[in-house]
Amino acid sequence: MFEKLDIKKFFKKVSKKKTFHYVHGQFHPRHDWSILIVIFFIIISFGFIFNFYLFLRIAAGDIFRTETEAVKVETLDREAIQGMVNLFKERARLLEELKSNPIEIPDPLL
């Protein structure tokens, strides 16, 4: 009922089976696909490792840590801001004057 398995024959059959072989002087498409699949899994593995490392760094709080001396806040020059506000108020006043008293321009065709 059960035949005796000969291990030597089994490995001979497996070793004779070639996955990378030439067909008419060119590689078989299986060779190209296997290379693409291996490269794909290598890229996925590197991405997983990098994302896991980044997750651990963010969870520990190390990645966004800054030195307190490096942050400098400059205050605004209030006089310059007030001068700019006054300039805009003056221009708004001049615009209102022009709207109420339009400039008389003679028609050049007459």
Image (tube, rainbow, N blue to C red):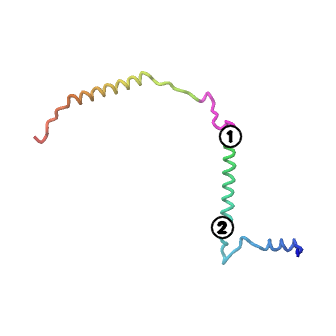
> Sequence-wise, which precedes: disc 2 or disc 1?
2
Quadrant in which residue 99 is drawn:
top left
- Marks 2 and 1, how far apart in space? 38 Å
Q: Amino acid at mark 1?
A: Arg
Between 101 and 106, the one lying in front of the other is: 101
Q: Position of residue 49 (x, y in %)?
A: 69, 49
Q: Are there few (<14), some (14-19), or many (20+) residues within 10 Å of tag 2?
A: few
Q: Can you say whether 73 is above or below 63 in the image?
A: above
Residue drawn at 66 percent across, 39 percent down: 58
**Does the magenta run of residues contain 96?**
no
Residue 84: give x, y in percent of width and height: 38, 26
| Residue range (magenta) | 57-70
Query: Does 92 sit left or right of 19 as displayed?
Result: left
Check disc 1: other Cα within 10 Å, few if <14, some if 14-19, many if 20+: few
Task: Give the residue type at disc 2.
Answer: Asp
Query: What count of labels does the image hold?
Result: 2
Q: Which residue in the rendered view is the most extreme toward the front? A: 1
Quarter of the rendering containing residue 44:
bottom right
Please indicate whether residue 56 sits to the left or right of residue 74 in the image: right
Residue sitting at the far top: 79
Residue 77 is labelled as none
* Above/below status of 7 relative to 50: below
Look at the numbered disc 1 and give the secondary structure of its residue: helix
Q: Position of residue 75 (x, y in %)?
A: 50, 24
Closer to viewer: mark 2 or mark 1: 1
The label on residue 57 is 1
- The picture quadrant where one finds residue 65 is top right
Q: Which residue is mark 2?
A: 32
